[in-house]
Amino acid sequence: MLSAQDPGRRVYMHPATAGVPLNSRHAPISAHQSISKTQYQKQQALMAQGSRGQDQDLQHIWIVTGPAGCGKSTVAKNLSINLQVDFIEGDDYHPESNKQKMRNNIPLNDGDRWDWLIALRDAAIESLQTRSSVVMTCSALKKKYRDVMRVAAYDHPMVQIHFIYLDADEDTLVQRVTARKNHYMPPTMVRSQFQALEKPVLGSERDAVTVSCNASPDVVQDRVTREVERIMEEYK
């Protein structure tokens, strides 16, 4: 597995607010204590019951997900600018072998994605060493892929994971990918992604929201912004 510090990978930062928490309840992850998975689950249960203390230093990982062509990068970049936090482009963390398979219209399997997911998770945790939040893109097509990302919170109970799934029909996404220039993902790969896709199910994945992206970029961005604002209101 390539290191999260590989020079070919990029984390887009907003220097003007480096190290500045969103509010007094948000602080770098380096200040947190590591706990077990069982302790983490107990902590999450308490928080779900509305017992969050005002002195807790919450952090947030916002993961914009969905198949190719749904607009993950555009939405995530704009969200990172609005929140003034780092942006991590998931495609940057694919090894060349994965990109070559996709160029050749060969779908990635679980083994191809595993190290990629772990590298992305590590990059998010690294970003939280100095920031209160991070926004990243990751197709996260299957629930077990999303579960890999959720492990980021096991040792850090103040980290909140949020998935924003951008939903659109297959034909729309094929048209968008066809219109792309100089991208390694061919339109034919959209079909294979839909075959693997497990959309977040309402009620079973409480950290995931679905936003329709069958609209203009401005409309989609507005929908995502409203969802993020709604989620953040729950932590006040």
Image (cartoon, rainbow, N blue to C red):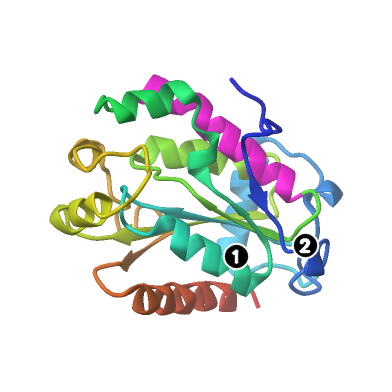
The answer to whether residue 165 is left or right of residue 123 is left
Callout 1: few (<14), some (14-19), or many (20+) C-alpha neighbours within 10 Å?
many
Residue 80 tag number? 1
Closest to the observer, 223 or 53: 223
Which secondary structure dominates the residues rendered in magenta? helix
Q: Which residues are magenta?
A: 108-128
Residue 103, position as x, y percentages in the image:
31, 30
Q: Residue at x 79, y 63 (%)?
A: 15
Closest to the observer, 145 or 112: 112
Q: Quadrant of residue 36?
A: top right
Q: Is residue 186 magenta?
A: no
Callout 2: few (<14), some (14-19), or many (20+) C-alpha neighbours within 10 Å?
many
- What amino acid is found at the position of numbered circle 2 in the picture? Asp
Work out which quarter of the rendered image holds the C terminus and state it: bottom right
> Viewer-nearest of labels 2 and 1?
1
- What amino acid is found at the position of numbered circle 1 in the picture? Ser
Q: Are marks 2 and 1 in contact (CB under 8 Å)?
A: no
Work out which quarter of the rendered image holds the N terminus and state it: top right
- Residue 24 seen in render: yes
Closest to the observer, 230 or 10: 10
Q: Residue at x 86, y 51 (%)?
A: 31
Q: Quadrant of residue 172?
A: bottom left
Q: Earlier in the sequence, mark 2 or mark 1?
A: 2
Residue 199, position as x, y percentages in the image:
28, 50
Q: Is residue 119 magenta?
A: yes
The answer to whether residue 178 is left or right of residue 31 is left
Q: Residue at x 78, y 50 (%)?
A: 29
Q: Residue at x 24, y 28 (%)?
A: 105
Tell me the residue that label 2 is attached to: 57
The answer to whether residue 219 is above or below residue 14 is below
